[in-house]
Image (cartoon, grey):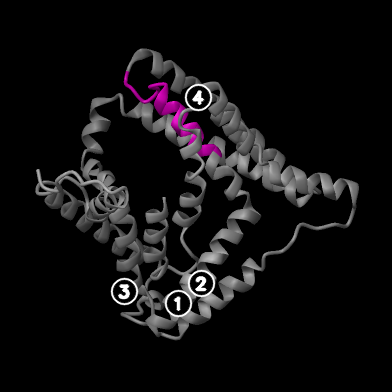
């Protein structure tokens, strides 16, 4: 996770607004002491974080002290500073601002928006689903994911209605917004897992298999490619590209990445950054890494 924080800084240098991988690297540290807990304990801990305890604490303080507001972390001001740095057209000014103000802004936004509480809850939930073999393709898991899809859809709709009610205190609105997001995520996950049972869907998404095996490499390289194309320090094409042109650029970049992933994984066991992460992890542990080549 410390190495993942390094990759987060690498990506943040090219991407204004900080990098969510830094938040993930901090949240993921929770999995280390929790990895040997019983499944019931993991579920309880996951539900604790997904309940958004920080926001409920804020709401309780507001109820007892009307007029009190949660502390502001100046996220809007930080993002304004980042835009000014990008507009200079100087890569080093932009990169420094991204790595300092940007990373703080990302963490601060995660706290204000409820993401910092939600992330460890989702990671623990994913750990439980994997441990219980719910991602295997069989009739039992199909029933589970079908029910999950229906409950998630109902929850997403219900929480969306509640979060749109007028007069909700800010922290309570954040809670229901995060619950809506979790349910909507459940719709996507359950839907994809169920669709993957269909042979034509597996064939249609086959090119994404290699793309997913190099997800970290693709994630960071997307920022580098987009930065070089759109930002003023390089080509600066952002003012000249509308939605359609930007979509075409993204589609072309992703197509090139898929081709590169296929070529690279025919010759290497891991992706570029994945292999570096793997080797550095084992070197940090004082052990020899598995060979990179097949």
Main SS class of the magenta portion in the image: helix
How far from the left and from the top, in percent, is residue 194? 37, 26
Residue indicated by mark 1:
96
Residue 165 seen in render: no
| Among numbered discs 1 and 4, the one appearing first in the sequence | 1
Left or right? Give the position of 252 relative to 262. Answer: right
Task: Return the residue found at the far front.
Answer: 286
What is the distance, in whole Å, between disc 2 and disc 4 at their CAs?
40 Å
What is the distance, in whole Å, between disc 4 and disc 3 at their CAs?
41 Å
Let me know if residue 82 is in the magenta part.
no
Left or right? Give the position of 63 relative to 140. Answer: right
Residue indicated by mark 4:
148
Q: Is residue 6 above or below residue 50?
A: below
Residue indicated by mark 2:
100
**Position of the C terminus by quadrant:** top left
SS at badge 1: helix
| Among numbered discs 4 and 3, the one appearing first in the sequence | 4
**Region of the chain picked out in magenta, as a range:** 121-137
SS at badge 3: helix
């Amino acid at each position: 996770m410390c190495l993942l924080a390094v990759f987060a800084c690498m990506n943040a240098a090219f991407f204004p607004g900080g990098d969510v991988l830094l938040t993930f690297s901090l949240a993921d540290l929770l999995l280390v002491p929790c990895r040997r807990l019983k499944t019931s304990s993991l579920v309880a801990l996951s539900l604790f974080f997904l309940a958004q305890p920080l926001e409920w604490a804020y709401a309780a303080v507001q109820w007892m002290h009307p007029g009190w507001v949660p502390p502001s972390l100046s996220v809007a001001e930080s993002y304004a500073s980042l835009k000014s740095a990008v507009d200079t057209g100087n890569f080093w000014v932009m990169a420094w601002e991204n790595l300092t103000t940007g990373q703080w802004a990302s963490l601060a936004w995660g706290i204000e928006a409820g993401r910092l509480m939600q992330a460890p809850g989702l990671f623990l939930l994913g750990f439980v689903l994997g441990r219980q073999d719910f991602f295997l393709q069989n009739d039992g898991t199909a029933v589970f994911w079908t029910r999950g899809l229906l409950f998630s859809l109902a929850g997403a709709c219900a929480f969306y209605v509640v979060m749109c009610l007028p007069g909700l205190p800010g922290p309570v609105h954040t809670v229901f917004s995060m619950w809506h997001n979790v349910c909507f995520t459940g719709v996507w996950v359950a839907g994809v897992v169920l669709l993957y049972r269909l042979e034509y869907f597996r064939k249609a998404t086959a090119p994404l298999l290699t793309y997913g095996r190099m997800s970290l490499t693709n994630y960071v390289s997307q920022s580098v490619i987009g930065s070089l194309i759109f930002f003023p320090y390089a080509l600066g094409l952002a003012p000249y590209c509308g939605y359609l042109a930007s979509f075409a650029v993204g589609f072309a970049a992703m197509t090139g990445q898929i081709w590169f992933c296929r070529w690279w994984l025919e010759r290497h066991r891991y992706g570029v950054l994945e292999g570096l992460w793997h080797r550095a992890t084992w070197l940090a542990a004082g052990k020899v890494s598995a060979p990179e080549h097949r």
